[in-house]
Amino acid sequence: MIKETKHRLLQGLTHTLDLPAEVMLDLPRTTLTGSSKILIENHKGILSYQPEHIRVLTAQGETVVRGKRLKIESLFATDVVITGVIHGIELVGLGV
Amino acid sequence: MLARRLWSYCKGYVIIKVKGEAVEEFLNSLSRRGIHLWEVNRLSRNFLICKANMDQLPGLSEAASLFPIHVEIRHRVGLPSIGKRLWQRSTLIFGAVASLVCIYMLSSIIWVIQIRGVDPVEQALIKEILKTNGIEAGVPRSSIRPRELETQLMMELPQLAWVGVGARGILLAVEAACKTEIAQDEKTPGDIVAGKGALVTQIIPFVGQAVVTEGETVVPGQVLIDGSLAAEDMSQHSEIIPYSGEEPHYLRASGVVKGRVWYSGFGEAGVVTYNRYRTGETYKGYHVAVGPWNWVWGVSRSPFPLFEESRVTKPFYWKRLDIRLPVRMDIIEFHELIEEKIEIDLESAKETALLNAWRDIESRLGPRTEILSQETEVFTEEQGGNVLIRAKRVVEVHEDIGVFRPLQAQTRVGREEND
């Protein structure tokens, strides 16, 4: 209950003051370059890694990257760069 | 990305192989610990390969112990691992250092001495002086004092006008220039003598005294205008420079002496002549000689019955260092010839023979020659089935016959004794 209230408060403040949401609310930010590279910032870990799909846990659920010959190019504590032939991105469990 | 890779290479990184059921959990654990992974490549369900910085290996092995996985280092890449490998191969380092020391030591020694700008005689003298000073191939470059050497060479060889000594690398270059002697021809005393046997037609002495008269016959070498001042009035020739301060008795004789000269020339021509032409067919042969060993490629003997041979010799000469290697290559080319028989009529053959006789004379005629008269005789003779025409031509010309002859010391003494 307290957590939810805090979250709403932060959301309102971010909206009112026009602050970056990914910083204030720890939201994931996904940057897709063409169809060969994707950068997911503020991730919470890798749920599953297969050459056909990679599931990445975020604060709002999970981001599923589908494609061919997918590879984790770089893995940092908060950022993950995935390369390969990207066919689609699916956001699962949004609205938390 | 490139900068990051370069930095990783400098710091050193490892390629690791991860095997097990919980690879994703292991990757998450590593990222949470701040261990950066890159080029994570999943090869099968339970097997992946990735790269990690070498300095993060302790954290990596600590994380690996928490999961049911097997981590193996496949390669160590980067400068630290290269340094470590080199350190383990001390002989290699020793060899590299020894090579560098050898190169340094050998390059600080003079191996080639090059002398340029002077004749071989002076070159030999310079070499001798260098050798006397202990400078020859094999001496350390630091022992050479170029300025001192230049001064010494200039003092010991007065015929040199300039010397430059420079030591560059393994080469000691000595460049020198000899003094140029000023021609003394204009001051040399002497006589005007007959260059050819002739009948004197005109003699005008400018300096000196005429010793022959017009109409007189002279032989080659006979004095025509005497440079001796004994017969001359010294006061008339005050502008003439005497031979030397001690002997003011001889002058440089000059004047015009013309005479009639007879030249005879011979020429011949056959009615049948043979001309040879190249057909264009050639064969080449290469002859390589290295010291006493010889190799021949291609054709060594002419395959043509009638041929012309041309030979080009290419010695292997290193011009820059004046080194002649004992290697030589001869390129021999055989050209096929064809012979053509040409028959001309008797009149044309006579003309050719007379022309040849004139060419024989023409080469001996002096400049500004005036032809006075000429006589020709033609003989016909048969030789081996061919008619041969022989021609004789005698030409009388009017030309300069006077030639200056410098007064030699011996001649001078002889003359003084006679006087």
Image (cartoon, rainbow, N blue to C red):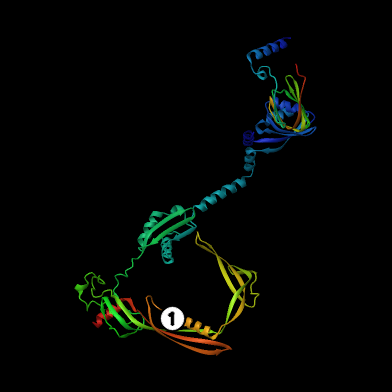
Image quadrant assignment for residue B132? bottom left
Q: Chain of mark 1?
A: B
Image quadrant assignment for residue B12? top right
Side of B304 where B373 appears, left or right: left
Q: Amino acid at mark 1?
A: Ile
Instruction: From the viewer's side, name the closer residue of B414 and B325.
Output: B414
- Residue at the image position 43 percent from the left and 79 percent from the top: B362
- Residue at the image position 67 percent from the left and 26 percent from the top: B34
- According to the picture, the residue beneath numbered tag 1 turns out to be B361
Instruction: From the viewer's side, name the closer residue of B218 and B144.
Output: B218
Q: Residues within 10 Å of mark 1 (few under 14, many from 20)?
A: some
Which quadrant: the C terminus of chain B? bottom left
Secondary structure of the residue carrying numbered label 1: helix
- Residue at the image position 48 percent from the left and 86 percent from the top: B391
Task: Tell me where residue B367 appears, x and y as whole percent.
Answer: 38, 75
Residue A93 higher or lower than B17, as above or below: above
Image quadrant assignment for residue B75? top right
Task: Tell me where residue B370 appears, x and y as whole percent.
Answer: 37, 79
Say if residue B144 shows up in the picture: yes
Residue A31 higher or lower than B309, as above or below: above
Task: Tell me where residue B179 appears, x and y as whole percent.
Answer: 36, 63
Instruction: From the viewer's side, name the closer residue of B149 and B255.
Output: B255
Total labels: the figure holds: 1
Side of A53 where B403 appears, left or right: left
Say if residue B220 shows up in the picture: no
Side of B226 where B270 appears, left or right: right
Which quadrant: the N terminus of chain B? top right
